[in-house]
Image (cartoon, helix red, strand yellow):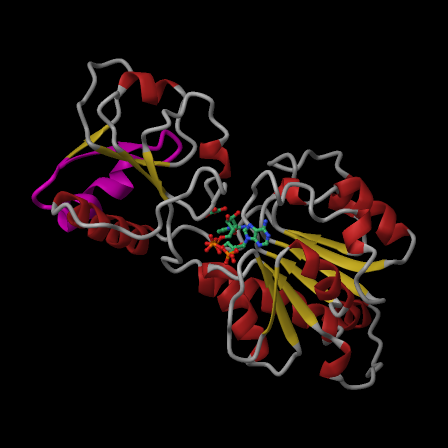
């Protein structure tokens, strides 16, 4: 197998030694758009330039260095015959669970209020937490969502999840399909979105859906920016129908300096760091799949383009 590293935003020096040690029998090279085609069989990619596909016609599989493949599938130059393989967890699910727990606890345990109290040297304990008043709902029950839901359930919050096909997860009330979305939203106070971005899920967080959440609702968006109608969220915050939001992903990234989210007192933002790709874990997972492909064996994590994830 010939493996090509085609991630112009990542330094190959950080990746090649790991790849070489995991795949000693493979030829490994870095994509050179000025040079002749490498003839590589598979490539590691993250937001690759469109020119890659015409330049490297021998590629049969792309290993995406992330879980979400929305940007890749949106490229018109992507040849239909190429297999797309996404990262499956690879150390990201635990990060996602930490992030969601942090945002949940900040809201439910009043940590934001206590930070303000400290700034004002004010000693003002609030009544203790009643978990029954904080039902959490997780949109998406895949690698990330299942781990998020299980982690929150371990802290005894009532947790539900929503997916496309029926799922069964201990301690999590599972809803599936479009016709169950409303019931899921109505029992949810803290909504965590960890769906992939597809034509079906684009814009799913909007006035109509967010208005169905319980009073005092909080939104945690760690999926993709275009899931959320940002103007609808701002209006619902203003109207008091949403209490607060923790957002990691945005319609435009980096978030423009003039965006109202930067200064909104009830919006907490982070720069798309909820779950970062970990080099060692990612390379180990990809290398194991490359070895299976070399032996002609099937691999998991292959994206279904028609589904969009
Ligand atoms: P998976 O493919 O493992 O899981 C996707 C889940 O979403 C599945 O449960 C799937 O349902 C569900 N789903 C998809 N479409 C629909 C739909 N139309 N209606 C209901 N449920 C649907 O993905 P991951 O968990 O690995 O990743 C999810 C997303 O998280 C990524 O695509 C990416 O956008 C985001 N992400 C963000 C990061 C960050 O740092 N902010 C880092 C990593 C990922 P079913 O189970 O039936 O297939
Ligand atoms: C991913 C991401 O999809 O980092 O892995 O957003």
Q: Residue at x 76, y 47 (%)?
A: 206
State whether residue 186 is above or below residue 56.
Answer: below
Q: Is residue 141 placed above or below 66 in the rendered structure?
A: below
- Residue drawn at (20%, 31%) of the image: 41
Name the one closer to the observer, 271 or 188: 188
Let me know if residue 181 is in the magenta part.
Answer: no
Residue 7 at x, y percent in the picture: 35, 33
Q: Tell me which residue sits at (33%, 22%) in the image.
A: 52
Q: Quadrant of the N terminus?
A: top left
Specify the segment rendered in magenta.
Answer: 1-27
The residue positioned farthest toward the right in the image shown? 239
Where residue 225 sits: x, y (%)?
A: 63, 42
What residue do we see at 25% from left, 32% from top? 60
Can you give x and y, in whole percent of width and height, for residue 10 in the image? 36, 36
Q: Is residue 84 above or below residue 269?
A: above
- Name which quarter of the figure residue 262 lies in: top right
Q: Residue 22 or 41: which is nearer the viewer?
A: 41
Left or right relative to 46: residue 215: right
**Residue 176, quarter of picture:** bottom right
């Amino acid at each position: 197998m010939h493996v090509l590293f085609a991630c112009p935003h990542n330094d190959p020096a950080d990746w090649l030694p790991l790849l070489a040690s995991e795949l000693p029998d493979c030829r490994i090279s870095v994509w050179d758009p000025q040079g002749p085609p490498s003839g590589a069989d598979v490539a590691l990619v993250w937001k690759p330039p469109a020119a890659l596909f015409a330049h490297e016609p021998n590629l049969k599989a792309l290993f995406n260095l992330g879980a979400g493949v929305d940007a890749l599938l949106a490229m018109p130059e992507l040849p239909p015959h190429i297999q797309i393989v996404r990262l499956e967890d690879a150390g990201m699910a635990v990060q996602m669970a930490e992030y969601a727990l942090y945002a949940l606890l900040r809201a439910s345990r009043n940590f934001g209020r206590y930070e303000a109290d400290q700034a004002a040297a004010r000693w003002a304990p609030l009544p203790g937490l009643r978990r029954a008043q904080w039902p959490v709902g997780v949109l998406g029950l895949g690698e990330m969502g299942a781990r998020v839901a299980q982690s929150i359930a371990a802290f005894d919050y009532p947790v539900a999840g929503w997916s496309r096909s029926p799922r069964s997860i201990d301690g999590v009330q599972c809803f599936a399909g479009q016709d169950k979305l409303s019931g899921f939203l109505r029992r949810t106070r803290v909504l965590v979105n960890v769906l992939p971005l597809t034509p079906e899920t684009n814009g799913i967080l909007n006035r109509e859906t967010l208005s169905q959440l319980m009073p005092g609702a909080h939104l945690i968006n760690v999926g993709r920016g275009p899931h959320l109608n940002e103007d609808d969220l701002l209006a619902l915050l203003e109207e008091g129908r949403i209490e607060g939001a923790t957002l990691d992903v945005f319609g435009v990234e980096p978030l423009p300096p003039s965006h109202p989210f930067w200064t909104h007192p009830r919006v907490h933002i982070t720069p798309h760091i909820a779950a970062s790709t970990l080099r060692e874990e990612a390379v180990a997972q990809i290398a194991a799949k490359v070895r299976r492909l070399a032996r002609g064996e099937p691999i998991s994590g292959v994206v279904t383009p028609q589904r969009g994830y």
